[in-house]
Amino acid sequence: MADELEIHKIVREGYAEIARSRKSYCSSSKGKKSSCDCRGNSSAREISKNIGYSDTDMAAVPPDSNLGLGCGNPVALASLIPGEVVLDLGSGAGFDCFLASSRVGPAGKVIGVDMTPDMLDKARENAAKGSYKNVEFRLGEIENLPVADNTADAVISNCVINLSPDKPRVFAEAFRALKPSGRLMVSDIVLKQELPEYLKKSASAYIGCLSGAILKDDYLKTIKKAGFKKVKILEEASFPLDDMINDPTARAVLDDLQITQKKALELAGSIASIRVSALKPA
């Protein structure tokens, strides 16, 4: 696989195309349009409902903020209370930020960080439409968060950390940004067994949330090594087999690498979606 700078470039360009098109797709390595939502070719609303968002959640935010890019609902798990500061890693068009906004109220604050200028433009446009006064979006990489130490009461992230080429740095930054006793709540894609080497090296598989994922045990160890305590998986679900066959990104990867349907089903069994919580010690 490419180096860190190249990976950032690949991911940034893919998600910039999603933001500009207002659809959940990006370019594969051969220029084909392909989904980046990791969840199949359903509508953003259907995807979001399947991963834990309610109709009330989706009705409460600007429609253009929900691009169907997640793999869980970290906001529902974060137990946010009025007055808290929330930091969203990889905030996209602002969906989770806007949901968090209502939970922390006027006395609280939500900071979204994203490295894609097109996504930030979209998020800020959505914030203006919804008159969100307690939400702010900042340009930055999740490996180098543009926030001060001890800023947030809660750090959330939704299917983004798997895209980072330096996950230890991401969790170290999240730890730094959290206040003592602050909590981490993320939804992400992990592996139950190693992927074949040819898939790890695929750029289209990286954008499709596949080759950037690491083993589940390694993911949890990385969080612990950053200093977090009480690290636990709250929910785990296998990657749906039909997604591996029907998802346009996965389909493009399979076509690019000439992977058979039988082999694709085997690969799908290697992938899981998890929701993880952890605490920064007091």
Image (cartoon, rainbow, N blue to C red):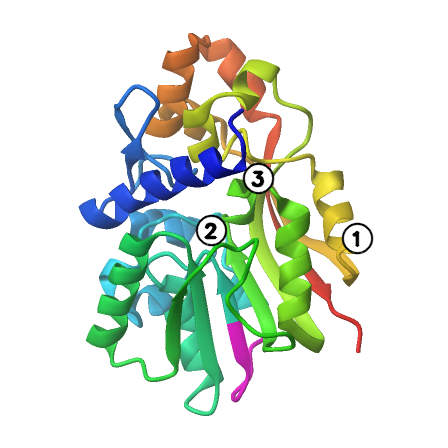
Name the residue nearer the viewer: 203 or 65: 203
Q: Which quadrant holds the N terminus?
A: top right
Residue type for callout 1: Lys
Residue 84 on the magenta segment: yes
Which one is in front in this view, the residue at disc 2 or the one at disc 3? 3
Report which residue position mark 2 lands on. 51
Residue situated furthest bottom in the rendering: 107
Tell me the distance, in whole angstroms, between the alpha carbons under discs 2 and 3. Answer: 25 Å
For image coordinates 54% across by 43% down, the residue present is 164
Q: In x, y percent, where is residue 263? A: 53, 11
| Magenta region, main secondary structure | loop
For image coordinates 69% across by 34% down, the residue present is 215
Report which residue position mark 1 lands on. 225
Residue type for callout 2: Ile
Question: Is residue 78 among what the camera can see?
Answer: no
Tell me the distance, in whole angstroms, between the alpha carbons under discs 3 and 1. Answer: 17 Å
Q: Is residue 236 above or below residue 256?
A: below
Classify residue 189 by image quadrant.
top right
**Number of the label disc, if any, that sits on residue 165:** 3
Which one is in front in this view, the residue at disc 1 or the one at disc 2? 1
Going from N to C along the chain, the mark reached first, 2 or 3, is: 2
Tell me the distance, in whole angstroms, between the alpha carbons under discs 1 and 2. Answer: 28 Å
Question: Is residue 251 among what the camera can see?
Answer: yes
> How many residues crowd mark 1 within 10 Å: few (<14), some (14–19), many (20+)?
few
Q: In x, y percent, where is residue 10? A: 40, 35
Q: Is residue 58 left or right of residue 197?
A: left
Residue type for callout 3: Pro
The residue range painted magenta reads 79-86
> How many residues crowd mark 3 within 10 Å: few (<14), some (14–19), many (20+)?
many
Q: Secondary structure at mark 2?
A: loop
Residue 255 on the magenta segment: no
Name the residue nearer the viewer: 88 or 244: 88
